[in-house]
Image (cartoon, coloured by chain):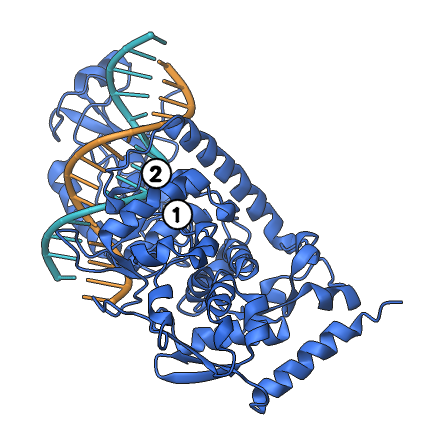
Chain colours: A blue, B cyan, C orange
Amino acid sequence: MEISSHQFHLLEQLNEQRRQDLFCDCNILVEGKVFKAHRNVLFASSGYFKMLLSQNSKETSQPTTASFQAFSPDTFTVILDFVYSGKLSLTGQNVIEVMSAASYLQMTDVISVCKTFIKSSLDISEKEKDRYFSLSDKDVNSNGVDRSCAYSAGWRAESSPPPSHLSPDQGTCMMGGNAWNNLSYYPPSQRTAQQQLSKHEQRQDSGKRSRHMGLQQPSDIPPYKSSKLEDRAAEPAGHSAQPEEQVQMEPEVESSRVGYQYGQGADATPRNLTGSQQERESPHSSGKAKSSKGEEPYRSMPFILGVMGSWAEADDLPRMRFKCPFCTHLVKRKADLKRHLRCHTGERPYPCEACGKRFSRLDHLSSHFRTIHQACKPICRKCKRHVTELTGQVVQEGTRRYRLCNECLAEAGIDSVRIDLEAEAPLEFPPDGDKDSQWHYGEDNRSDVEIVEDGSGDLVIQQVDDSEDEAEEKEVKPNIR
DNA sequence: CTGGGGACGGGGCCC
DNA sequence: GGGGCCCCGTCCCCA
């Protein structure tokens, strides 16, 4: 007979002991803050601690002390709370760092949950647009929507199976073990988006796979130029990291003296373990450590994932401070990482209000808008000649605009009709960041504009006026920035 | 099959 | 430090 609540009570007791500092035999120092915990629990929860403590098993008489600077105390609090409670308190703000720390500590379940959390945060459906915009990562907890999510371990789920509709937006989620696999994570409202994402990812994956199919990864590729290699590792479930990639990465890592330094500059000893632990603590940066038996856990560690640190100022390598948790890509700036992450998450927060197409980057959207909807290129679409206000006109076809020279217009049988651009409201780009704002695309003014359609449909001709067009661009630019 | 257009990701630069 | 813009290279789609 099995009492399902036993595990829960056992962990609860351990957590209580931790709170009361009873039998704690391990001190973890995170940026000056000391956490007390039990070796057994840490050993059972983290591959990193397993390796560390197994190395240190002979010295059981004294408390083990580990020190970290690769993540913040707050992040470790989330991790430790998870270890002792099975609940992972993720928010839009901490998920990246928690995932990074989890990768560091080799807690694959936590990594998986973080990745799922990130994915669940995606919203690329039109339906969810407004809601999505209200949940930008700067205010994910505002607007009355609590995006924090506590994930509970599987044993908890066994005793009280989670409803399948739980989501990060809907309160506590359960995870862990097999139970997590059965969890239908996305709420109905997000499934459409998720399906779209899947489609997008499939397309991206297939494209990229074909793009990089058979790509031999040269060992001398600089680590900071790994963008073309990332995709192989970019698959969301790619934790179990391709062994050959790891093997290839390690020499680079060594030669680059990678340290797990999180925003701490070129600190050569980002995390310190007391006494003889020092050597073991840098399995990736120390050849000695690598050769040790204790390195084995790191060999299987998904090194390519989840480590957000900085490159030491080694040799002539530029400082690459941020590591993509999904792939091997390294970037210098946090903003670049944020931007890069969208290529993994599929997040497309910038919709074109003119055609509905969504973009992952504002500059791509603005580029698309200028190209497709504003006809900014002073080039005849047909003959490719440069056109001016005198030699060509803007043709509007639905929401698309392009330019044709007078000759091509005549060939096409389109009569030249001057349209006063000042009278017509130009297609305007929405103000920066105001994603909810309505674009001024014709809606109000279209009826006022005297547009001339050819017989075939909504083909509209406007006279090209470069000076006005430039003015239009200038008018648009401030909105873009 | 090929070339052009558009999308997209990365990097650099400026504000 | 972050956001936005620009440029470049690559890929996909389509005529």
Q: Whole-percent x and y of residue A136? A: 43, 63
Residue bearing mark 2: A229
Q: Is residue A276 visible?
A: yes
Most extreme residue toward the front is A58
Q: Is residue A143 visible?
A: no
Query: Total of numbered circles in the picture?
Result: 2
Going from N to C along the chain, the mark reached first, 1 or 2, is 2
Residue A151, compared with residue A254, is above or below; it is below
Residue A166, compared with residue A326, is above or below; it is below
Disc 2 residue type? Leu
Helix, strand or loop at disc 2? loop
Q: Whole-percent x and y of residue A160? A: 78, 68
- Mark 2, other Cα within 10 Å: few <14 / some 14–19 / many ≥20: many
In the rendered image, which quarter is residue A309 located in?
bottom left
Q: Residue shown at 49%/57% (left/top)?
A: A118
Find out whether the residues at labels 1 and 2 contact each other: C-beta distance under 8 Å: yes
Residue bearing mark 1: A327
